[in-house]
Amino acid sequence: MTTHEINWGKCIEVCSDGAKAMTGKVSGVVARIKNVAKNCNSTHCILHRYALVTKRISATFKSVLDEAMKIINFIKSKPLQSRIFKAMCEDMASLHTTLLLHAEVRWLPRGKMLVRIFELRKELMAYFIGHKFELSDRLNNMPWLCTHAYLADIFGKLNELCLALQGKQVNILQEKDKLIAFSR
């Protein structure tokens, strides 16, 4: 700002991800900007709001999401099980041979993880025939599968939206239009 002689007084809005380094009351970037630009407001980033909202989904959806993660963790937690599942998928000529891990701190993999489980549901059912696992019956449970498919679709659409809201040539007007269109 100083190098290019940009007037801080013209700064009216700052958007951050909510990290302590950004929002600290004394030494955070937002506080430092507000000290120089008195009329500046701050908001939480649109992409990170999405991640926060997904933490407050209904109990039914949360249960299906948690169980899907447990299914993945059952296979991915042990290298031998993961290799056996991969070999089985290759033998069945599956479209995919591995499940995707989901990390709570990353929003994008959630949708992809759910889609991958849905695409590999037959392979997972065959795999669980030889393994005792308390959630193996979920893959035969139609209400659970329907809820899972719904979540996969919704998170997939949210992933598309979040990716469309990023980039160097994106501005707030375009983002607002995309959000309104998505809401409709």
Image (cartoon, rainbow, N blue to C red):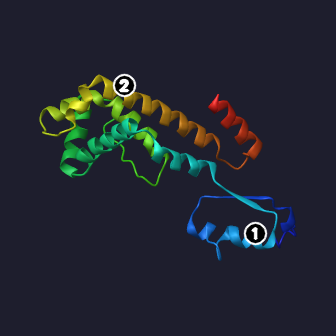
Q: Position of residue 59 (x, y in %)?
A: 38, 39
Q: Which structural element holds mark 1?
A: helix
What's under tag 1, amino acid-wise? Answer: Lys
Marks 2 and 1, how far apart at CA: 48 Å
* Marker count (numbered): 2
Position above or below: 107 against 143: below
Position above or below: 86 against 37: above
Q: Position of residue 2 (x, y in %)?
A: 83, 73
- Residue in the picture at 22% in, 51% down: 79
Quadrant location, the C terminus = top right
What's under tag 2, amino acid-wise? Answer: Cys
> Which residue is under mark 2?
146
> Which residue is under mark 1?
34
- Residue 36: quadrant of the picture: bottom right
Q: Is residue 64 visible?
A: yes
Circle 1 crowding by C-alpha within 10 Å: few under 14, some 14–19, many from 20: some
- Residue 133: quadrant of the picture: top left
Q: Position of residue 3 (x, y in %)?
A: 83, 72
28 or 78: which is nearer to us? 28
- Residue in the picture at 21% in, 51% down: 78
Quadrant location, the N terminus = bottom right
Q: Is residue 87 left or right of residue 66?
A: left
74 or 60: which is nearer to us? 60
**Which disc, if any, is residue 51?**
none
- Residue 86: quadrant of the picture: top left
- Residue in the picture at 62% in, 67% down: 22
Of the image marks 2 and 1, the number of the one nearer the N terminus: 1
* Residue occupying the far front of the picture: 59
Position above or below: 108 against 3: above
